[in-house]
Amino acid sequence: MALTNRPRRIGRYGTAAGTGALAALVLVAVCGSPAYVGWAHDHTGPNSAGGWFLRLLGWPAWRFSGEDGGLLAGNLRAVLLVVLAATFLYLLPAAQVARVQGSVSQFFSGWAAYVLAGGLASLLAAFLGPDPTLLAALQSAGTGASYGFLAGWIVGTASLGGRA
C-alpha cells in the first residue's frame, strides 16, 4: 500500500445524525426535566429575552406523575420529539448530497430536522392525547415548530461534531 493511501481512522467519531440525535436527547432530558422546568419558572421572568428563552427550552416537559391525562399522554410530546428528531436527522440527506459537503449543510440539516420534529411531535401528541381537536393540534404544531426553530440551533451545532 502506498504511503498516500493510508486509511483514515474515523471510527471513534460519530455521524452528524448520531451526534445531533444525542444532543436532542440530552436537550429534552435536561431542559424538559421537572427540576429544570421548575427552576426556569421560579427564577426567570417571562418579560425578558433570556428568561423567555430559558422557559422555552423547557417546552418538551416530561414528568414522573400523571396527574392530568395520564403519564403517557403527558410525556408523549417529549418522547415523540426525541424519536422524530433522530429519524429526521438520519433521513435528511442534505449533508450527504450537498454540492459542497461540510459544516454549513450539516448545521442546517440538524436545525431543520429539529424544527420538523418539534412541529410533528406536537401535532401527533395533540391528536393522540386526551380530547383531540383539529384547532388544538394545529396550534400545538405551531408552538412545536417555533420551539424547534429557536432551540434547533443547538442540535444543528451538535451535528457539526460528526462526520457526514
Image: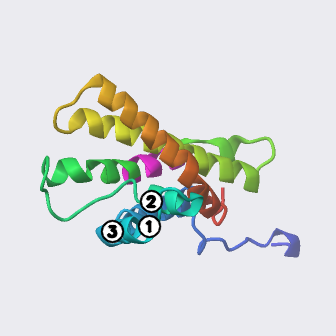
Crowd band around label 2 with a 10 angstrom C-alpha radius: few (<14), some (14–19), many (20+): many
Q: Nearer the viewer, residue 127 or 15?
A: 127
Q: Which residue is mark 2?
A: 55
Can residue 15 be seen from the camera position used here? no
Residues at marks 3 and 1, CA–CA distance in whole angstroms = 18 Å
Magenta stretch: dominant secondary structure: helix
Report the magenta residues as a range: 82-90
Q: Disc 1 or 2, which lies upstream in sequence?
A: 1
Closer to the camera in the image, 77 or 44: 44
The kind of residue on which mark 2 rests is Arg
Q: Is residue 159 left or right of residue 29?
A: right
Q: Which residue is mark 1?
A: 26
> How far is disc 1 from disc 2 in space, using C-alphas?
16 Å
Badge nearest the viewer, 1 or 2 = 2
Colour mapping = rainbow
Q: Earlier in the sequence, mark 3 or mark 2?
A: 3
